[in-house]
Amino acid sequence: MSGGVGNRFWPFSRESMPKQFLDFCETGRSLLQQTFDRFKSIVPTENIFVVTNKRYAKLVREQLPDLCDNRILLEPVRRNTAPCIAYSSCYIKSINSDANIVVSPSDHLILQELDFANNIRAGLDVVRKFPFLLTIGIKPIRPESGYGYIQTDKGENYIRKVKTFIEKPDYRLINRWLKCDNFFWNSGIFIWNVNVILKAFSVYLPDIWLNLAKYSLEYTFSDKMVCFNENFAKCSNISIDYGIMGKAKNIYMILAEFSWSDLGSWGALYNLSKKDAKGNATLKCQTLFIESENNFVTHSEGKFVVIQGLSNYMVIEYDNVLLICKKSEDQRIGRFLSSIKTQYGEKYI
């Protein structure tokens, strides 16, 4: 899934160049390319599909030249993750009527890639045997209100029954959950059989099912695109978490054996960054910190920054924008954009 904008990474992530197409970690590969590389070690390239907004078709083709055009599925409008998954599942079913599918965001940072591959293969083995809607949970290592959480049954089983999904709770709840052994971060990575997920759509999201399940085996790629463009905008704007994972009875989880970050905000990148003795971190620039602590600074390459008397702030400059924001308030950046758009139009978005 590669159609999001990544508002909370503004001003680096823009409408014209969202975060999945950027190299935040200075590896030489964008987040999308890193995701593609991870899955190439698990499945053949022809079994990898990218779903993105039609605006980003050129970017996907430029960054993933090995991917054929009929493996790039273009959304005419943004409709969240449930319609995205429904359409791609229908399309994959037209190629393989009993396919097992891994659904993954394209903008996560995943280290220990061998462990990741082993986890994915183990999950695929599970859904070959059982009609589960399977997700991968991450053991929390800190209170993080920007993530979704999964509550499972208690126990030490490798496969755990999911009790509920909780979206972005407050810190009081999270601090209690960290003491329990059955609360996990929601990785947003799902594994299932194509027929199991499409049945779930027919039960829990029938409007999406009726709009997108019209693709049959005899449709050509271009015919599918025509039908898709006609019907996609009619679908509910809803996430797979709210629409299906929070309702279905056959939801199970396996625990991740790899390190993970959804890189959902600048704060998440700060947590992963190397810091000096006073907790200051920099990216893509040199900074002199004076009487300052626990700050995150990133500027255009080639610029030198001096920070004095600042604590727990982010100083982020990119192109025509300078953002200075409390580090604890980074979840509000998406809301700042609404005010910017109202007062100044699209110039800075």
Image: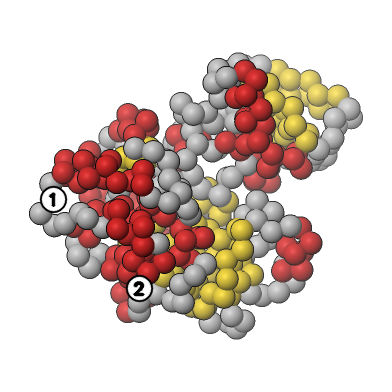
Give the labeled residue for mark 2.
Answer: 127
- Which residue: 40% across, 62% down? 205
Q: Quadrant of the C terminus?
A: top right
Q: Nearer the viewer, residue 79 or 287?
A: 79
Give the labeled residue for mark 1.
Answer: 219
Q: Secondary structure at mark 1?
A: loop
Q: Nearer the viewer, residue 211 or 87?
A: 211
**Percent position (x, y) of residue 42?**
33, 58
- Which residue: 85% across, 30% down? 310
- Which residue: 69% across, 25% down? 323
Q: Quadrant of residue 176?
A: bottom right
**Percent position (x, y) of residue 253?**
50, 71
Q: Is residue 119 visible?
A: no
Q: Secondary structure at mark 2?
A: helix
The answer to which of marks 2 and 1 sits earlier in the sequence is 2
Q: In the rendered structure, find residue 176 and report the number of the disc placed on it.
A: none
**Residue sitting farthest toward the left:** 218
Q: Nearer the viewer, residue 170 or 12?
A: 170
Q: Within 10 Å of the Cα at label 2, are there few (<14), some (14-19), or many (20+) other Cα atoms?
A: some
Q: Quadrant of residue 164?
A: bottom right
The amino acid sitting under disc 1 is Tyr
Above/below status of 274 relative to 259: above
**Percent position (x, y) of residue 250?**
44, 76
- Which residue: 49% across, 44% down? 107
The amino acid sitting under disc 2 is Val
